[in-house]
Image (cartoon, helix red, strand yellow):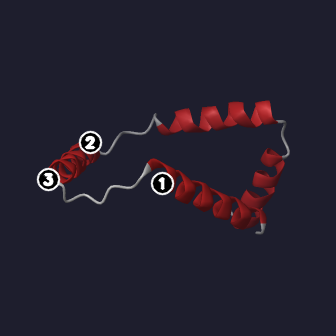
């Protein structure tokens, strides 16, 4: 889809009432599950989880306090939203 058409479609979709946008978002997210999963992805994620768990057990992981993590996440989300609306 050309960028201008995508921008127009995005604007039209964002003009929908919240309940209709939520329903559409749900349908779109569900459609992603129809794709064949990457056969290597699950193994890669399991290996990463094992690596991280071992780092915590070994005491080599850099742990972040929940309040600090939440503040960073909130800040990044706010910045992303502001960037999105300024396009």
> Relative to 11, is 79 above or below?
below
> Distance of mark 1 from mark 3, alpha carbons?
22 Å
Is 13 on the left-hand or right-hand side of 45? Answer: right
x, y percent for residue 21: 75, 37
Could you classify mark 1 by the number of other residues whose Cα lies within 10 Å: few (under 14), some (14-19), or many (20 or more)?
A: few
Is label 2 in contact with label 1 (beta carbons under 8 Å)? no
Could you classify mark 3 by the number of other residues whose Cα lies within 10 Å: few (under 14), some (14-19), or many (20 or more)?
A: few
The residue carrying mark 3 is 58
x, y percent for residue 18: 79, 36
x, y percent for residue 85: 77, 62
Q: Give the mark nearest the N terminus, 2 or 1.
A: 2
The residue carrying mark 2 is 42
> Relative to 69, is 42 above or below?
above
Quarter of the image with the C terminus is bottom right
Q: Give the mark nearest the N terminus, 3 or 2.
A: 2
Q: Quadrant of residue 13?
A: top right
Quarter of the image with the N terminus is bottom right
Mark 1 element type: helix
Q: Is residue 17 visible?
A: yes
x, y percent for residue 44: 23, 49
Q: Nearer the viewer, residue 58 or 50?
A: 58
Disc 2 or disc 1, which is closer to the eye? 1
The residue carrying mark 1 is 69
């Amino acid at each position: 889809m050309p960028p201008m058409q995508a921008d127009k479609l995005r604007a039209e979709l964002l003009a929908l009432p919240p309940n209709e946008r939520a329903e559409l978002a749900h349908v779109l997210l569900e459609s992603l599950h129809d794709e064949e999963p990457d056969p290597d992805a699950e193994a890669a994620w399991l290996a990463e989880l094992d690596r991280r768990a071992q780092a915590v057990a070994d005491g080599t992981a850099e742990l972040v306090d929940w309040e600090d993590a939440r503040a960073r996440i909130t800040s990044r989300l706010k910045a992303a939203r502001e960037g999105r609306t300024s396009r």
